[in-house]
Amino acid sequence: MNCTDFLAKLTDYFDGQIESELLQEVKEHLGTCHHCEVVVDTTRKTIAVYQEQQPYDFPEDVQTRLRSAARFRRVARHSTRTARRRSGVWIRSCEHARTA
């Protein structure tokens, strides 16, 4: 097993849904590959941290600012798309006027 094969099976490994023969290959690979061992250790620690966390409610002012920023980005993205569409239409109509 190489690192690419190992990473492809990482989720199954953590979910405990890996065949015993493949599990043996994974364990052998981890015994010889420090990089993949670090990936497993880091992933285990990350899972543990997230499992221990309690939901946290942001203060109302932070929620308001986040919503405002998200709304601003949506509007800006929409405006940019609309402007591109309009300029594309304008360019096509100008090209059509030149050829007519």
Image (cartoon, rainbow, N blue to C red):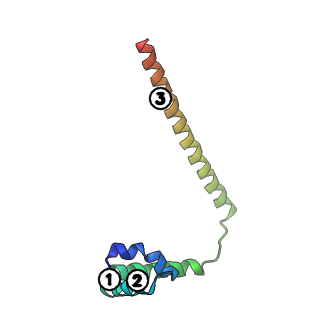
**Quarter of the figure with residue 62:** bottom right
The residue at which mark 1 appears reads as 34
Amino acid, disc 1 = His
Furthest-right residue in this view: 60
Q: Is residue 29 left or right of residue 56?
A: left
Position in image of residue 43 (x %, y %): 46, 78
The reply to whether dot 1 and dot 3 touch (C-beta < 8 Å) is no
| 1 or 2: tag closer to the N-terminus | 2
- Under circle 3, the secondary element is helix
| 2 or 3: tag closer to the N-terminus | 2
The relative height of residue 59 versus residue 1 in the rendered view (above or below) is: above
Question: Which numbered disc covers residue 65?
Answer: none
The reply to whether dot 1 and dot 2 touch (C-beta < 8 Å) is no
Amino acid, disc 2 = Leu
Q: Nearer the viewer, mark 1 or mark 2?
A: 2
The relative height of residue 56 versus residue 94 in the rendered view (above or below) is: below
The residue at which mark 3 appears reads as 88
- Under circle 1, the secondary element is helix
The residue at which mark 2 appears reads as 22
Closer to the camera in the image, 16 or 51: 16
Q: Circle 2: is it few (<14), some (14-19), or many (20+) Cα within 10 Å?
A: some
Amino acid, disc 3 = Gly
Position in image of residue 15 (x %, y %): 52, 80
Find the distance from the CA under tag 1 to the CA under tag 3.
54 Å
Position in image of residue 58 (x %, y %): 65, 66
Name the residue located 55 percent from the left edge and 42 percent from the top edge.
76
Position in image of residue 71 (x %, y %): 62, 48
